[in-house]
Image: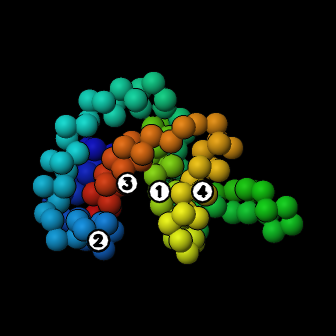
């Protein structure tokens, strides 16, 4: 993801609409520079926890069985590959939060997901991938 982000930033192709609102007027190079001090730590985490990732795991890309509401498939697999699970979790949880009316509901949903998934959420790690991902779409 970092190599892709560097390429997108170097081409000046960052789409500001994909960025968090508070970052939409910040140059892509500056945004990438903010993430750079974390790269060594994130690479260590990825090496210790590499999984198959969707690459764009958001609710519209998940197919549910209408009878059971179980996950029955995924679409848009163009970015499928090996990565840190937090690359997918950051997108999934952020996208899911858009369905909740109150911040409290979103936090409760995140905690319920993490409990069923069997992890304690690392919010700094989520934030890193949430800020890196928009720099890769250009």
Label 4 crowd (10 A; few <14 / some 14-19 / many >=20): few
Q: Are marks 1 and 3 in contact (CB under 8 Å)?
A: yes
Tell me the distance, in whole angstroms, between the alpha carbons under discs 1 and 4: 17 Å
> Is residue 81 something that shows in the picture?
no
Instruction: Bin the neighbour count of mark 1 within 10 Å (Cα to Cα): few under 14, some 14-19, many 20 and up.
Output: many
Image coordinates for residue 53, horizontal then vertical, percent = 52, 44
Residue at which label 2 appears: 21
Residue assigned mark 1 = 91
Question: Which sits in the foreground, 81 or 114?
Answer: 114
Check residue 108 in the rendering and tell me which mark sits there, or answer none: 4
Q: CA distance from mark 1 to mark 2?
A: 16 Å
* Cα distance in 3D space between marks 4 and 2: 23 Å
Q: In this view, which residue lies farthest toward the front?
A: 104
At a point 48% along the width and 61% down the height, the residue shown is 94
Residue at the location (29% across, 71% down)?
21
Q: Which mark is residue 130?
A: 3
């Amino acid at each position: 993801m970092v190599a892709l982000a560097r390429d997108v930033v170097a081409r000046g192709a960052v789409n500001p609409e994909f960025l968090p609102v508070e970052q939409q007027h910040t140059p892509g190079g500056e945004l990438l520079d903010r993430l750079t001090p974390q790269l060594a730590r994130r690479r260590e985490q990825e090496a210790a926890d590499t999984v198959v990732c969707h690459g764009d795991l958001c609710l519209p890309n998940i197919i549910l069985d209408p009878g059971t509401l179980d996950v029955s498939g995924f679409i848009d697999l163009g970015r499928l590959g090996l990565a840190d699970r937090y690359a997918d979790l950051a997108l999934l949880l952020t996208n899911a939060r858009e369905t909740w009316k109150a911040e409290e509901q979103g936090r409760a949903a995140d905690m319920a997901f993490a409990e069923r998934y069997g992890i304690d959420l690392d919010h700094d790690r989520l934030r890193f991938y949430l800020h890196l991902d928009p720099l890769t779409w250009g």
